[in-house]
Amino acid sequence: EVQLVESGGGLVQPGGSLRLSCVASGFSFTRSAMSWVRQAPGKGLEWVSATNWNGDTTYHGHSVKGRFTISRDNSKSAIYLQMNSLGVDDTAIYYCARAEGWSIVGTTPYLDHWGQGTLVTVSS
Amino acid sequence: QSVLTQSPSVSGTPGQRVTISCSGSSSNIGSNTVNWYQHLPGTAPRLLIYSDDQRPSGVPDRFSGSKSGTSASLAISGLQSEDEADYYCATWDNPLNGVEFGGGTKLTVL
């Protein structure tokens, strides 16, 4: 059974930093691209970041570029999201997901397995 | 402000067929595949359709996807109360170089 378990969320002040983790099991993690998606209160889903299978290719959404960094440790079957310069607009539930169909021209990566999410609240 | 446009809401009665549309442009839907997700607030989103019209295993065939030009659609037939949820389209946007979600459509089963 595929399992994705996020952790690291919590309350942080504006301008602060936080590091989220996602530990995976039940599939071949070292062959899988992974992604972070978030949902702010009352808003829709927003794609945040993604990494290919070995971490040498990463993508970040325009609203987090330059502030967030995705990384992975295949020895621990884990991905991370380092979030810096946090603002109130970053308040959201952050979901970890497996991304299939990566690096195929014309194919949008699809997120076929998701974690339950971890809540990040940015507030003073 | 998403580059993909979805109607904010749609409704139907049990057993009815409803469609949810997603409108984009030549730089996203027009040149990349579309995926659809179902999301009940407080739970993990669920992949319904990938690569325009493919259903993952476990997704009922009541759900179907299609695409024409710069628009895509999700159809749900034989509507059930458990289908009440938010539905999102998603596609790669070439200029933004990333995945873009539509704003979401709230489906209400009357």
Image: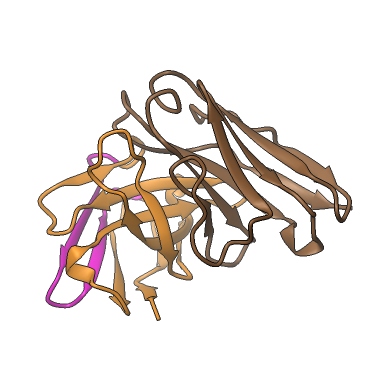
Chain colours: A orange, B brown
Q: Residue at x 49, y 40 (%)?
A: B52
On the rendered structure, is B107 left or right of A99?
A: right
Front one among B25 and A84: B25
On the rendered structure, is B88 left or right of B81?
A: left
Give the magenta-colored segment's residue range.
A65-86
Residue A37 % position (x, y): 41, 53
Vertical side of B67 occupied by A89: above or below: below
Front one among B54 and A17: B54
Residue placed furthest toward the front: B61
Q: Residue at x 79, y 54 (%)?
A: B78
Vertical side of A97 occupied by B20: above or below: above
Residue A111 can be seen, yes or no: yes
Residue B56 % position (x, y): 49, 59
On the rendered structure, is A87 left or right of B55?
A: left
Residue A43 can be seen, yes or no: no
Vertical side of B22 occupied by A11: above or below: below
